[in-house]
Every structure is written in structure tokens, then in C-alpha cells.
Image (cartoon, rainbow, N blue to C red):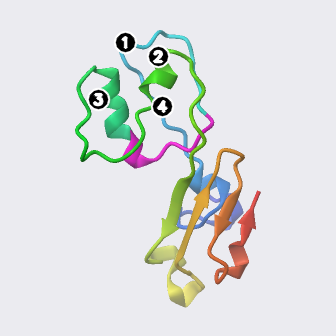
Amino acid sequence: MLQSRGQFKKQKPWDESIKVPFILKFPNISNELRSINTPFETVDILPTILGLTNIEIPQSVEGVDFSPYLLEKKTPPEKTGLIMCPVPFHEWSRIRGGRKFRGIINKNKKVYLCKRFKRFLVVV
């Protein structure tokens, strides 16, 4: 967060915390800049790298292989991404008003959180 909204830690469902760019430089991909607006999660990293290296992706691997969308400039499917803070700690501890949250973010950049976290119901 680096002082955005007066905060340092990334434990809140704000854009500065959840919308982090994933930058990848890979030999098979041209130097042309490509961007995907669909949520890309940590779980998508392994299948994407396996796809880029033409290694068969085991059925036990979770996540989406984004390599076709990077190599062939196809449009990725609609996908939602999970966002969460299962245990508030440090700067956003319970004593300081920290709350657990779980939610999803979609391609339209709308964030939907569980209703009991009224402070952050919908972030657009």
C-alpha cells in the first residue's frame, strides 16, 4: 500500500492491494507487450509456465493455463479471482479494527465481499 490511504500493509480489499501486476519475461514470447485483464491468481502460475514450456499439465494441477492467451493473443475466458484475508495481523490486527474477509473479483474489476464485512461490501 506504501502509504496509500495511510496504510503500509496489503491486508485490505482495495485496488492497491489486490490488483498487483504479474510481469513475465519468457523466451518463447515475443518482446511485444501483452496484457490480460482477466484476474490472474497464484494458482494460475504453474499451469501457465508448464503451458509455455510445452510440458504436459498433470490433472492434479489446479488453475488456468494462460499460455494460449499470451502466445496466440486469444481472449481469455470469463474468470473470477479469490481475494481474502483469513487472519488479520500486524498493522490490521483485530485490536486496530482488522477483519477477516473473503470475496471475488471479476473481469469487470468489481469486487464482491461477504455481506458481514459491511465496510467493504462492494468496491468498484
In terms of sequence position, does the residue under pointer 2 or pointer 4 come before the other? 4
Q: CA distance from mark 1 to mark 3?
A: 12 Å
Find out whether the residues at labels 3 and 4 contact each other: C-beta distance under 8 Å.
no
Nearer to me, 24 or 76: 76
Q: CA distance from mark 2 to mark 4?
A: 15 Å
Of helix, strand and loop, which one carries label 4? Answer: loop
Residue bearing mark 4: 23
Could you tell me which residue is drawn at 45 percent across and 76 percent down? 90
Q: CA distance from mark 3 to mark 2?
A: 13 Å
Q: Is residue 43 magenta?
A: yes
Which mark is in front, 1 or 2?
2
**Disc marking residue 50:** 3
The residue range painted magenta reads: 37-44
Find out whether the residues at labels 1 and 2 contact each other: C-beta distance under 8 Å.
yes
In terms of sequence position, does the residue under pointer 1 or pointer 3 come before the other? 1
**Residue 12 placement, left or right of 121:** left
Residue bearing mark 1: 28
Q: CA distance from mark 3 to mark 4?
A: 16 Å
The image shows residue 122 at horizontal and vertical percentages of: 74, 66
**Disc marking residue 71:** 2
Could you tell me which residue is drawn at 46 percent across and 22 percent down? 68
Amino acid of disc 1 = Asn
Q: Can you see residue 44?
A: yes
Amino acid of disc 2 = Leu
Q: Is residue 28 above or below residue 69?
A: above
In terms of sequence position, does the residue under pointer 4 or pointer 1 come before the other? 4
Instruction: Look at the image and tell me in which quarter the N terminus lies.
Output: bottom right
